[in-house]
Amino acid sequence: MGLSHGENLLALKRHVGSNPTPSEDLKIKSMNNLGKYRKYYFLENYLFTDINKNFQKHGYLTPEEFFAIVIWKSNRAKTNVCKGIKKSKKTIREITSEIFKIKMPEQKLEIITSIPNIGIPIGSAILTVCYPDDFTVADYRACEAIKSFSGEINGNPTIKTSAYFEYLEKCKKLAHKYNFSLRDFDRILWGKDFYEGSNGLKQIAKGIE
């Protein structure tokens, strides 16, 4: 098995020592620069580590960080979200700084969903990355899967704000009951519907050899 990028880079640095030749120095810099792109392949991990930490440290998201979340949630929505941001006449820094300063969860969601073309699914995804212990993603798969745990939600959590917060509270209680983080419970709900839901993996593969 070959060495990882990090292992190759470390091996090269050890080989050249403290006085690399110009060509060796260029190779080290190139490896460092190329390595930064891997984080986008493991996008969710990047969101909940680097971007979350940056938001907590700086109190806002950069445009690249913001749209990384949008693309993670719904790649096809990015163009409309971009148009909505421009239409709002606000910068992403202004929007996310306001979210950071506001304490009430309902107000945080109201701020992000007041931007044209950003509904609860995208808004909740942005808030989930920024506050993974306080928010969860309003995804149609997860919203469908939770019915098998706690019955119907009063309204559609992807459309209705009160239904979203009802859904969120149920997710928090169930996550606690089954000893999962809120973030992991969201993954479980998504995976449950992906596997067992209508036209899910289980149904598609059934009877096929």
Image (spheres, helix red, strand yellow):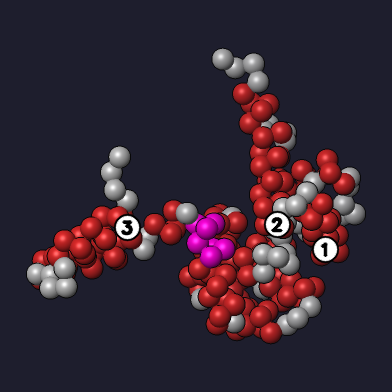
State the residue at coordinates (72%, 46%): 189
Identify the element where label 3 is drawn.
Answer: helix
| Residue 21 x/y as whole percent | 9, 69
Identify the element where label 2 is drawn.
Answer: loop
Q: How many marks?
A: 3
Res 52 quadrant in image: bottom right
- Quickly name the residue at label 1: 165
Q: Are marks 2 and 3 in contact (CB under 8 Å)?
A: no
State the residue at coordinates (59%, 77%): 56
Left or right position of 162 against 47:
right
Magenta residue check for 48: yes
Say which of marks 3 and 1 sits in front: 3
**Of callouts 2 and 3, which one flags the residue occurring earlier in the amino acid sequence?**
3
Q: Are marks 3 and 1 in contact (CB under 8 Å)?
A: no
Amino acid tagged 2: Ser
| Residue 41 x/y as whole percent | 44, 53
Of residue 30 and residue 179, the one placed in the foreground of this image is 179
- Quickly name the residue at label 2: 181
Identify the element where label 1 is drawn.
Answer: helix
Marks 3 and 1 sit apart, C-alpha to C-alpha, by: 43 Å
**Vertical relation: 172 (above or below) 152:** below
Q: Are marks 2 and 1 in contact (CB under 8 Å)?
A: no
